[in-house]
Each structure stands twice: as C-alpha cells, then as structure tokens.
Image (cartoon, rainbow, N blue to C red):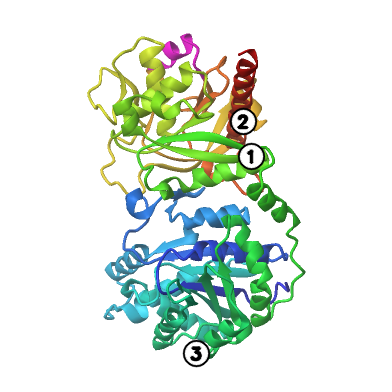
C-alpha cells in the first residue's frame, strides 16, 4: 500500500444479540489483510463504565487480558494478538469509563473554558480522538475498530455517533462499516429469517449510519436469493452481503471469510491495492487442529471458574496452539477445585495425562488446588501451575515435603505463622483495586541447565504478570534443601518467577501468565513443553496397559 495514502478505518458493529463473534470476525479480517502485506492493528471500544476490565468478575466478563504495558483489557484483545501475532497496548482498548474519566479531568482543569460539557460534542470528540490515535502514528495502513455491545444499546450510542462523524469526515473511500447480524434458523418453519437483520440495520439507519457490508452469522449456507433479499431490504449491494457461518474451530473463520471474499470487498471499497494473501501456513495449522494425526491428550484444568470457561480463554487457546504443534487434540477436563476439596483428587484426576492448576484470586477452592498439586507431584503426573497455581504448589511442597504444616499465603490467612506466600513489596499499602497490581511485562533470568532454561533456550525472557502476592524469600532455603529449584528469578534475584522439581517427569510453575504470549503460529514454549510431557505420559501409560494386558 502506498504510504502516502490516508490510513483506512474499518468499523465493525454488531446487531440483534451479543456474542455473535465480532472479535473473531475483526481478528480474521485483520489476518487476511495482514497476509496481503498491509500493516494492521485493531482497537476495541467497550461501552461499560468501568475504567478497565481489571475489577470485573470472570463470571460477568470472562478473562482479563493483560498487555505488555500493563493494561487490563477485554479478552478480545487476546484474539487480536493471537491472529495478528502482534502486541497490543493501552491504546487498543478504550472503555466508556476511560472516556468520561478523561473528560471530567479536563473539565476540572478548566480545559473547556466555561462551556457546558455535553455528550455531543465533548464525549464524542474524546472518543474520536481515541479512534484516530493509532492511525496518526504512521505505523499502520489499516485500523480496524470493534464497537462492543449491540446496536440499540443506550451505552453504545456515543461510540456509534463518533463513528458516524468520522465516516462523514473521512469519506467512504477511507472509512467503512461492517455490520454483523444474526440470521436465525427456525426449525419448525424450516426457514432462515431475515427480519432480525432488517431491524438491526433499520436501527443503524435511525442514527445515521448505513452499513457498507453485512456479515450474517448463520448455521446454514446462504443462497444467492437470500443475499439478494437482505441486500434489497437493507440498502446493501448483494455482493457486500456475506456469510459468516459456524466453523469447527475459530481458526477456520479467516479461511471461510476469504472464500466469501470479505477482504477483497473491503479493499475495493477502500481503494486499496494489495497483493494476494498467503495463507498456506494458516491452512496447515487449521488442518492440524481439525484432524490431529496423533489422537488426543487429556489435560485437567483445576480452578474455581470451571463452569464459565471464558475465564480461562487464553489458556484454552494456548492448548489449541500447542496441541496443533504436536499433532494432538488437547481434551480439557474441567476440575472444580471445591469438588477436589470435598471429594479428594483421585476421583477427578486418575484418567488425566497432565494437570494445570489455574490462576485466580481469593481463598475459595484453594485447598482443593493444593490437594491437586500434591496428587500430581506424588503420582508423577505432568504438572503446570500458573500464578496462583505456582503459589499453591509451593505451599503444598512446604507442607508435605518440608514439614511446614502451617504453610499458607497471607492472601488466605493474613495471620498465618508460616507465610510461604505474602504481599509483593509495596502492595500492602495500596487500597484501590483498579490497575494497582504488578501488571505487564517484566524480565526474568533463567538458571542455566534448568528445565525452564532448556524449554526457552534463552537466559533472559520477558513475560506478562498480574498478581499482588509472591513467594516469601525467607522460606527459599528450606524449600531448596528438599529439592525445589527456583529456576527463574527477577534480574535482582528478589522475586521468584519459576519453580520446578527435578526428578519429576514435568513439574513446573510460573508466577507470570504465559498464556498471554501464545500465538497460533508460535505456541508458547511452556505450553508446548507441557503438552509434549503430557503426550509422553499418555504414551507410556498406554504402553503399560498394553503390556499388562498381554501378560494377562
């Protein structure tokens, strides 16, 4: 693309119902454009009044995704990074809360010179500034902007108004709108119904926005006649009505949208000249995901949000990436930590090939996680602990291998006699919850010759963090005397970042969140190694069963 051309803006909105998959659509389109040689980034505008996602419950919001610069963001940013293989930042996720917070601060400083501060123009102008922020850096040819929520929501109106103004100001050659809607199939009538899409577009028109492209989420193939009908009633060219069909894996969506020529339509409307997309590597990965050549590996995830799996979205996707690399399907066994606490670990873990103890906050289910970590350690099951998962593994080892029976974390027992895990320096004094943890990417030095060093193949790494508590250095000597190795530390040696147990088939924990750095094309090294260890455990177990059967 000619660098002298203005940066092109693609706004993606949704209608009818939420959870249609705007994040996957925008990520897929971003990938297709990137594969054509364009420089692409994606922004997400969320209508909630929270300043960021950091204080929201996983039950309401799902996973909190953390960027390198420490932003606590919407989980869609994880999709953006995984598809585009890029790092996002604070500028890639903007909420209503951040917009109003900024406007109120300006009003208090007197920046508006005595004007009455209103939604239009002050709030919308602030939104427009954020929407144009990345396009002004000179780093991108195309900026995709996803508007959260559903058209018609009162919370989304300021974002839609700002979008409308930008499209008018920039012109249709430089800014377009893709509207994602639902085409429900009514089984009793045997028909796909278009009325929800028509009403959604009608709502857009009522606020002055005419969609340029309609992406229709559907279970069934769309006929040409159906596309013509939708185009006629929604004022959209028939060739700009595309099918967004359900896929076996979300990583197949870019290939399906490519067949619908979504990227070609966008290029034509925005007058962009670009090369044909190179998708061979992506096609190969999708084939590996859909048809794993080496069967399945069963990995247990022990956590307390197991009934709402979006809380672990990046972990789930990291297993997909690592599974594809090893040509296996990782079958996740969701283990409720409170059930382990109630019933013991064997009932839930005797059939798994590996165990991941998940991150989290609060004391609910912690004793179950500790029991799970002990079972994996003593039964030689590959183990991987992330954040709190590492902390409970250290507590378990302190109690049962070091004989420190009162070992605990001050997060759960503030007055424990043996605070093996305690507050990070400076965290005790912080009273506000939002954005006050240790957040973002930090360096870590690996111990030469350790398992972690062999996995990464490097002495220095950078990983993303989100925590308030750490391993208490006062107990390090006792833990190491019994065989635990702290193989990853902060460069000043004050913070324990990775622990492992030599002699165990695979037992490793990390204080950071490696799942945030896993990509479709480059699985994270720790997940890659853990899946391999679980696969090896599966193979060995199968050989033992076969050998026993032959002897019998």
Q: Which residue occupies 52% across, 85% down?
A: 230
Residue closer to the observer: 28 or 80: 28
Of pointers 3 and 1, the one earlier in the residue sequence: 3
Q: Name the residue under label 1.
A: 328
Q: Mark 1 and mark 2: span between their CA atoms?
A: 8 Å
Q: Closest to the observer: 290 or 425?
A: 290
- Residue found 61% across the figure and 23% down from its top: 451
- Residue stretch in magenta: 475-485
Q: Name the residue under label 3.
A: 233
Q: In this view, does 255 lie to the left or right of 188?
A: right
Q: Residue 533: percent from the left, percent from the top?
A: 60, 28
Name above or below for residue 444 compared with residue 305: above
- Say which of 226 and 256 sits in front: 226
Task: Give the position of the C terminus as an image quadrant.
Answer: top right
Q: Residues within 10 Å of mark 2 (few under 14, many from 20)?
A: many
The answer for how far apart the CA atoms under marks 3 and 1 are is: 46 Å
Tag 3 near tag 1, CB within 8 Å? no
């Amino acid at each position: 693309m000619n660098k002298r051309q203005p940066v092109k803006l693609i706004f993606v909105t949704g209608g009818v119902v939420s959870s249609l998959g705007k994040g996957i659509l925008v990520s897929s389109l971003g990938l297709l454009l990137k594969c054509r040689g364009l420089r692409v980034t994606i922004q997400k505008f969320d209508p909630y009044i929270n300043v960021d996602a950091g204080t929201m419950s996983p039950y309401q919001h799902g996973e909190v995704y953390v960027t390198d610069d420490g932003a606590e963001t919407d989980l869609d940013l994880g999709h953006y990074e995984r598809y585009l293989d890029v790092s996002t930042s604070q500028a890639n996720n903007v909420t209503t809360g951040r917009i109003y917070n900024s406007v109120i601060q300006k009003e208090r400083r007197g920046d508006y010179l005595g004007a009455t501060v209103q939604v239009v123009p002050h709030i919308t102008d602030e939104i427009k500034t954020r929407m144009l922020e990345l396009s002004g850096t000179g780093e991108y040819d195309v900026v995709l902007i996803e508007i959260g929520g559903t058209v018609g929501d009162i919370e989304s109106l300021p974002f839609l108004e700002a979008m409308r103004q930008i499209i008018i100001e920039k012109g249709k050659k430089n800014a377009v709108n893709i509207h994602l809607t639902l085409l429900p199939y009514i089984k009793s009538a045997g028909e796909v119904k278009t009325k929800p899409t028509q009403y959604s577009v009608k709502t857009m028109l009522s606020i002055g926005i005419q969609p340029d492209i309609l992406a229709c989420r559907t279970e069934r193939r769309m006929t040409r006649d159906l596309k013509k009908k939708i185009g006629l009633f929604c004022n959209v060219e028939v060739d700009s009505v595309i099918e967004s069909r359900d896929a076996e894996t979300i990583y197949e969506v870019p290939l399906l949208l490519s067949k619908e020529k979504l990227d070609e339509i966008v290029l034509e409307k925005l007058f962009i000249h670009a090369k044909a997309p190179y998708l061979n590597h992506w096609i190969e990965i999708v084939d590996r995901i859909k048809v794993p050549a080496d069967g399945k590996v069963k990995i247990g995830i022990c956590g307390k949000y197991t009934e709402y799996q979006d809380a672990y979205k990046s972990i789930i996707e990291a297993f997909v990436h690592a599974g594809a690399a090893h040509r296996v399907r990782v079958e996740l066994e969701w283990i409720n930590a409170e059930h382990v606490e109630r019933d013991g670990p064997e009932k839930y873990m005797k059939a798994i090939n590996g165990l991941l103890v998940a991150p989290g906050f609060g004391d609910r289910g912690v004793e179950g996680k500790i029991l799970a970590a002990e079972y994996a350690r003593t039964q030689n099951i590959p183990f991987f602990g992330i954040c709190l998962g590492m902390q409970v593994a250290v507590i378990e080892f302190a109690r049962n291998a070091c004989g420190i029976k009162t070992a605990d974390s001050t997060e759960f027992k503030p007055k424990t006699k043996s605070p093996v895990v305690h507050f990070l320096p400076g965290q005790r004094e912080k009273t506000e919850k939002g954005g006050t943890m240790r957040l973002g990417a930090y360096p870590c030095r690996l111990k030469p010759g350790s398992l972690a060093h062999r996995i990464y193949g490097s002495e220095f790494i950078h990983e993303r963090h989100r925590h308030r508590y750490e391993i208490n250095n006062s107990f390090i000597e006792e833990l190491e005397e019994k065989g635990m190795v702290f193989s990853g530390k902060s460069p000043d040696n004050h913070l324990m970042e990775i622990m492992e147990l030599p002699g165990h088939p695979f037992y490793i924990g990390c204080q950071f969140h490696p799942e945030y750095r896993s990509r479709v094309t480059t699985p994270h090294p720790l997940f890659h190694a853990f899946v391999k260890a679980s696969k090896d455990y599966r193979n060995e177990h199968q050989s033992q069963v076969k050998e026993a059967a032959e002897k019998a």
